[in-house]
Amino acid sequence: MDLKARIAGLNAFLAEIYADGDMRLSRFLARIGIGEDDIEAIRRNHMEELAAGCIALLSQEPFKHDERSFRLISLRVGLDGMGTNA
């Protein structure tokens, strides 16, 4: 799966959830208290793990009883790494 497409999917998901077309994963991390230096280190060294962890968390918690909805949202925003199907 394409990492850039998965990150774009996470950014699209966050923008929808926060009703803020400007919300991105890095801004979300800053909002929860992660410092700029740590965000940059994550960006350089751990983006694949962060993306996989975020997507796994989304599939398990908010949609744990509704796998079909998660699959539809995943396809819609591109969490599968295949780009959006808007």
Image (tube, rainbow, N blue to C red):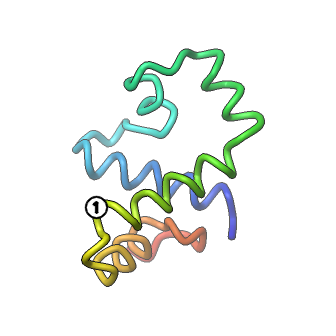
Residue 67: give x, y in percent of width and height.
33, 80
Residue 16: give x, y in percent of width and height.
28, 52
Amino acid at the residue labelled 1: Pro
Residue with the most extreme right position:
45
Please report the residue visible at 55 percent of the width from the left and 69 percent of the height from the top: 83
Please report the residue visible at 39 percent of the width from the left and 79 percent of the height from the top: 71
Residue with the most extreme bottom position:
68
Q: In which quarter of the image is the C terminus?
A: bottom left
Residue 3: give x, y in percent of width and height.
67, 58
Q: How many marks?
A: 1
Q: In which quarter of the image is the N terminus?
A: bottom right
Tell me if 84 is positioned left or right of 18 in this view.
Answer: right
Tell me if 54 is positioned left or right of 47 in this view.
Answer: left
Please report the residue visible at 50 percent of the width from the left and 62 percent of the height from the top: 56
Using the image as rendered, state which of residue 62 and residue 18 is in the foreground: 62
Residue 79 against residue 14 in the figure, above or below: below
Using the image as rendered, state which of residue 20 and residue 38 is in the foreground: 38
Query: For residue 72, what is the image quadrant?
Result: bottom left
Q: Residues within 10 Å of mark 1 (few under 14, many from 20)?
A: few
Residue 6: give x, y in percent of width and height.
57, 60
Tell me if 8 is positioned left or right of 58 in this view.
Answer: right
Tell me if 12 is positioned left or right of 55 in this view.
Answer: left
Q: Mark 1 points at which residue?
A: 62
Using the image as rendered, state which of residue 56 and residue 70 is in the foreground: 56
SS for dot 1: loop
Please report the residue visible at 38 percent of the width from the left and 24 percent of the height from the top: 31
